[in-house]
Image (tube, rainbow, N blue to C red):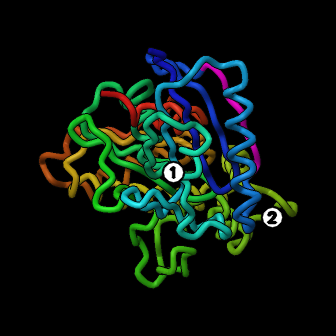
Amino acid sequence: MSDLVLAIDVGGTKIAAGVVDGDGSLLRGAVRATPADDAEQAWAQVRSAVDEVLAGTPSVRAVGIGCAGPVDTGRGTVSPINIGGWRDFPLRARVADLVPGVPVRLAGDGVCIALGEHWRGAGRSSQHLLGMVVSTGVGGGLVLAGRPFGGRTGNAGHVGHVVVEPDGLPCTCGGRGCVETVASGPHLVRWAREHGWQAPPGADAADLAEAARSGDAVAAAAFERGGRAVGMMIAGVAAVCDLDLVVVGGGVAKAGPLLFDPVRRALDTHAGLGYLSGLRVVPAELGGEAGLIGAAALLRP
């Protein structure tokens, strides 16, 4: 029997498909842009990426899907906040029609990122970890006792919507003051501009990081504020879930110490319980491949 798994990773900006072998190596991959508002156009991009990676590939034994949430793993449907055309979209059934006769598993993309890092990345040494992304949004997923943990509906670990500012900005989730409204790339840039950062239109978190490295005090303060919010969130999640490791990836995490230093300082302040004394926060290793490798890992024994 083939040990190959078709992996699919659906996010708000890109859709990826790949073929992953039994060792967790990505053999083939394809990427498409995500249409934001049209359900069938978004599905067409999924189908196109799948067709590309399966062309000339031997049969796959299973399919793993990670998708931006919320998801409903019981029903196999997805309602991503930033793909407006998909509400209760039957993604698992649609994919099963493309690859009939094999098991199809669906999970939130954060769970898949955590599982990918646990299998092949920075989380290999941990059985109790949070994998998260700080990018245009903030997302995450949990691996507990060495197994992916999705909770009742598949949305456990959705840490971007932990509240860190009770009177903070409205969030796309419908809440207010979520860590995503403080630490995501667009919100770092927004805050910096509001506090006097002079940058051309279209400047992003990478430009903000470069300004901070060059000595811009407002840019550095934006990262200090965002990192502190992420650290506060991590302290709470780690206390609840008894974690020993947090793996952080995504575009904002590429700022390195600008983000990680204030995260760790916040942990020193807020993670005071004795059982959290060994908690580590480390950069992710798999980059954009984490979601695909983690989606394939959903089918591991």
What range of the chain is rendered magenta?
A: 27-33
Along the viewing direction, whichever of 260 and 219 lies nearer the viewer: 260
- Left or right of residue 42, residue 183 in this image: left
Quadrant in which the N terminus appears: top left
Residue 264, position as x, y percentages in the image: 38, 47
Identify whether 16 is placed above or below 181.
above
> Mark 1 highlights which residue?
92
**Other-residue count near label 2 (Cα within 10 Å), few / some / many at <14 / 14–19 / ≥20:** some
Identify whether 119 is placed above or below 11.
above
Q: Is residue 283 visible?
A: no
Instruction: Report the residue at 43% width, 76% height from top.
Output: 165
Amino acid type for the residue under numbered disc 1:
Arg
> Mark 2 highlights which residue?
198
Q: Main secondary structure of the magenta part?
A: strand
Instruction: Report the residue at 43% width, 49% height from top.
Output: 107
Residue 174, position as x, y percentages in the image: 51, 80
Quadrant in which the C terminus appears: top left
Residue 145, position as x, y percentages in the image: 20, 38
Amino acid type for the residue under numbered disc 2:
Gln
- Left or right of residue 200, residue 25 in this image: left
- Left or right of residue 201, residue 122 in this image: left
Q: Is residue 57 visible?
A: yes
Identify whether 78 is placed above or below 44.
below
Q: Secondary structure at mark 2?
A: loop
**Residue at the right extreme, as displayed:** 200
